[in-house]
Image (cartoon, rainbow, N blue to C red):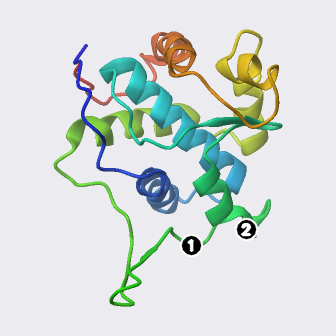
Amino acid sequence: MVNQKEESPYLPAHIANYFLWLAKEDDIKDMTTMKLIKLVYFGYAWYYALFEKKLFSEKIEAWRYGPVIPSIYHEFKRALSKPIDFFSINLSLETGETTYPIIDKKDEDIIQLLNAVWIVYKDKNGRELSEITHENGSPWRYAYDQGENTPMEDKLIKDRALKAIEKHKDSWNVSITY
């Protein structure tokens, strides 16, 4: 495993937009806020498990329906349980310019890993992904038992993600080097 501790240049919005783009490319029609949040969570978990580096610095919290990245929830909650038909945007208060947060194409490790997460989970809906995060022994369960909105522990996220990666490693045909 690569042991890199420098900060990630990405925000959860970058990861969310990548999954939204994949959903558009694959004509996946059920990309709800819950599904998007869980995919971003799995992306974070798998990346942290394989590279011991955070995909983004925002804390992941244990909410009623599973792990939540608060910024993604607040940005996409207006879609409610309907499919999301928009991307995250950045607005510069200085220039008034809007941009779309995107992952740099040079970050092949991140792209390959997110593609693997997509292949494994794209056909599941938000409720099914939530159920996966609620399994006994999950990092969500541990944090949620301490109280709603409790930040989840990265070590527990990593341990659980390594099990998921091992379980699904034959499901994708992308190359992840670590």
Question: Tag 2's secondary structure?
Answer: helix
Pointers 1 and 2 in contact (C-beta within 8 Å): yes
The answer to which of 150 and 86 lies nearer the viewer is 150
Residue drawn 57% across the image and 14% down it: 156
Which sits in the foreground, 60 or 47? 60
Q: Which residue is mark 2?
A: 79
Disc 1 to disc 2, C-alpha distance: 9 Å
Residue 80 shown left or right of residue 95 in the figure: right
Residue 43 is labelled as none
Amino acid bearing label 1: Phe
Rendered residue at 61%/50% (across/down):
36
Q: Give the x, y percent position of residue 176.
A: 27, 25
Tell me: residue 45, above or below residue 83.
above
Can residue 127 be seen here? The reply is yes
- In the picture of the structure, the residue carrying the numbered disc 1 is 86
Which amino acid lies under the numbered mark 2 shown in the image of this protein? Answer: Ala
Whichever of callouts 1 and 2 sits on the residue coming sooner in the sequence is 2
Q: Residues within 10 Å of mark 1 (few under 14, many from 20)?
A: few
Q: Left or right: 165 with respect to 54?
A: right
